[in-house]
Image: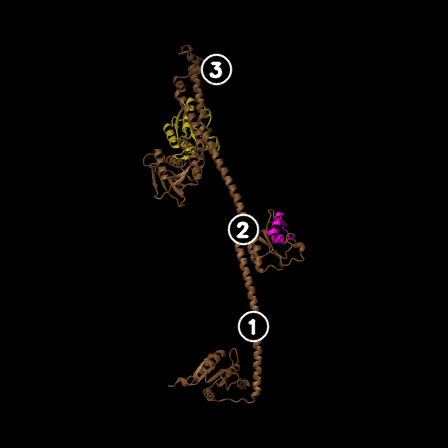
Chain colours: A brown, B yellow
Amino acid sequence: MIDPRKLSQVLYIEDSDEARSLVRRLLSNKYVILEASDPLNGLELAEETDPDLILLDDSLPHMTGSEAATRLKKMLPKTPIVIVSGDLTEGARERALAAGAVGFIPKPIDAAFEEQVDAYLNGKVEVLENAEVYLQAYQQELVERLEGNIRQLSNTVERNKHLLQQNERMFSMLERRHRLLETAARVGQMVTSILAIDDLLKHTVNIICSEFNFYYSGIFLVSEDGSWAVLRAGYAAAGRKMMSENYRLPVDEKSMIGNSILKQQAQIALDVAGQESRFKNPFLPNTRSEMALPLIVQSQALGALTVQSDQLNAFAEDDVTSLQAMADQIAIAINNAQLMHKLEAATSELVRTKTFEAIATATGEAIHWVGNKAAPIPGSIKRVREDIRYLLALAGQLNASQAQNESLAAAVQTVREEAQAQGVDLDQVIAEMSAMKKNRLQALVSAESLFEDLEIAENSAVTILSIKEGLIGPARQRNDEAVSLQEMIAKTVQNMGLPEGVVELTWAEDMPNAFVDERQVEQVFNNLIKNAWEALGQTSAPRIYVNGRRDKDPGFVLVTVKDNGPGIPKDIQEKIWVSFFTTKGGSGGTGLGLSAVMQIVNQHGGSISLESEAGQGATFFVRLPVEK
Amino acid sequence: MTTVLLVDDEKLILRSLEKTLLRAGFDVVTASDCKSGSETFAQNSGSIDIAVLDLNMPSFDGMPKTGAGLDLLANLKEQKSSLPVVILTAYDEVTKAKDAVAGGASAFFVKGREQGLVELIEKILNV
């Protein structure tokens, strides 16, 4: 067994893996082989291990074999260094020896390699003849290489400096871009939250100037007829001054603003000197760079944004891009605000139309209704008049002398005289009556008929007058308080005296009290239940289900009134809420019930709605505010 | 004696018209909706000379219906095609009433001056 501690150590510095593995195979049975793949590691390893022999490849990264040899020689003067080189040109061996090597083994290595290594380990030193010449040449080479290195280094330093500058520029650009983006984001946020155009524009010019240190910014909007760009927001004192003077520019090619709107393109002037006729604005004497960005939505220019600087060349490409992005957002916001404005106008017009329609419907229904109710009155009165004529004639037949006393005799006399005065010829009436058959005369002279006709006229008039109550009822002063709808509705149902078992009341356990005017809301449920009952006229097993619970919206209590009647046809579901609309015909409805119900519920801040399918009954949903 | 079938769901109107017609010397039978109107006519078809029908009243299913009188008109015409029929309307429904005349009614009458109905019936029946 060989003791590895007694073996010689050979350091092989070589960057080729194949070469190292070949040498390892050839020598490792005899020596301890230390390996390094580049000269810097090799130098370190040499210093640490102090090897017995150093084999050095001639062509290495970072430095040549000769340079490495010189360094190693200085570091370990006693250690023999052999250069193993593929450089077979003339003088390669000599250069190696001049650099401090004791030997030179040409590549490729062969079977003699082991012997050659042995020899160097045993002290073989090749002698260099004319050493002076080679040494000089080697030193010259070193100097040149050194110069080359210095050049390279200084180039690198230059490049680093340039990179550093570039980095700094990039950094400041990034920083500016970041601010631009932040500003754009702020404008974007405003765009979504401010619908008042003038506020939005004012904030925008303020942000643009304060964030970018621009000297001035303003926003123009195109006038209705498209011929003017009117200043709608301007920065600081100059802006205020221009606004107060209604500053505006024609939409033409003569101004940057006009031109940007006309062409729908950004206009940028990085140096306005010498173009004063075009750019001079007495309000903004210090402008040196200026840009006008069109505000475009759906290929329509709504206006333009101007940004001005008191510096030359103030706008980098990034600025233009960011400000144009901002301008686009402002354009969208302006468009939104204008659309909103139009929408509001359209809505109010629609509301107006609908209101007129509702009023017209209600008026029409009212006239129709009153006309219908009044229809029997003239007929009844006409008959009453006839009846009175006959009765007066009969009264006139009384003989004054037969009267019980003088007053009665005077009354008979008065009847005669007044009838005469009214143009009623009593004698002629008597003649008419005498000509009639007995049963015909009895039918005409009927106190029963007389009173019936008076009743018809009276009832018609009373029905018509009752609307007044129905109409002004809900307008009374409200007295809101916590009301248990369960108790109130139960009492209402009891008072209505409906047949046993028709109304079924169910209440959720957590049903809250409502905060309402008890009398008015009692009228609501009274009307709804009465309506349901009337709708059930032809239904064989009439049922009305009343249910109460807390609404999904916890601020409300929901009461549903459902019947199993014939339902309410779709085409009249809207009309039922209109005053005077009634389906009840002769059954005496005023057509005010549901209209009053809706009015009361709405006045309480609640809501009422209806769901009904033909044949499936109808359900009214009443939502009223809960006790707070 | 001339007999009139009078159908209207407004009780006061029905009674008032009935009295006016009675006084004018007609016999009057009354009903308050399409169903009872049709049944009443069927029971008295031999004696009824003319029908006076309200335009809006409960239809055959008992539900209030705009123009239900036209349904009854068609029904009565089926029972007796030669029957003269007068449709009663409010003043603001004259267009519909004219449709009724186009649909087979002899005339329409706007509710109000009841004596006018008497005159109309006399004219139609030539009495």
Residue indicated by mark 2? A333
Q: Looking at the picture, tell me which residue is in the foreground, A598 or B77.
A: A598
Q: Is residue A70 visible?
A: yes
Between discs 2 and 1, the one toward the N terminus: 1
**Does residue A220 lie above or below A541 as drawn?**
below
User: Residue A430 occupies which quadrant of the picture?
Assistant: top left
Contact between marks 1 and 3 (CB within 8 A): the answer is no
**Does residue A103 lie above or below B63 as drawn?**
below
Q: Position of residue A2 (x, y in %)?
A: 39, 86
Residue indicated by mark 3? A420
- Secondary structure of the residue carrying tag 2 is helix
Label 1 sits on what residue type?
A: Thr
Q: Looking at the picture, tell me which residue is in the foreground, B126 or A614.
A: A614
- Secondary structure of the residue carrying tag 3 is helix
Q: Quadrant of the N terminus of chain A?
A: bottom left
Marks 2, 1: nearer the viewer: 1
Report the side of B52 relative to A68 (left or right): left
Q: Position of residue A82 (x, y in %)?
A: 49, 85
Q: Distance from label 1 to label 3 (Cα)?
A: 139 Å
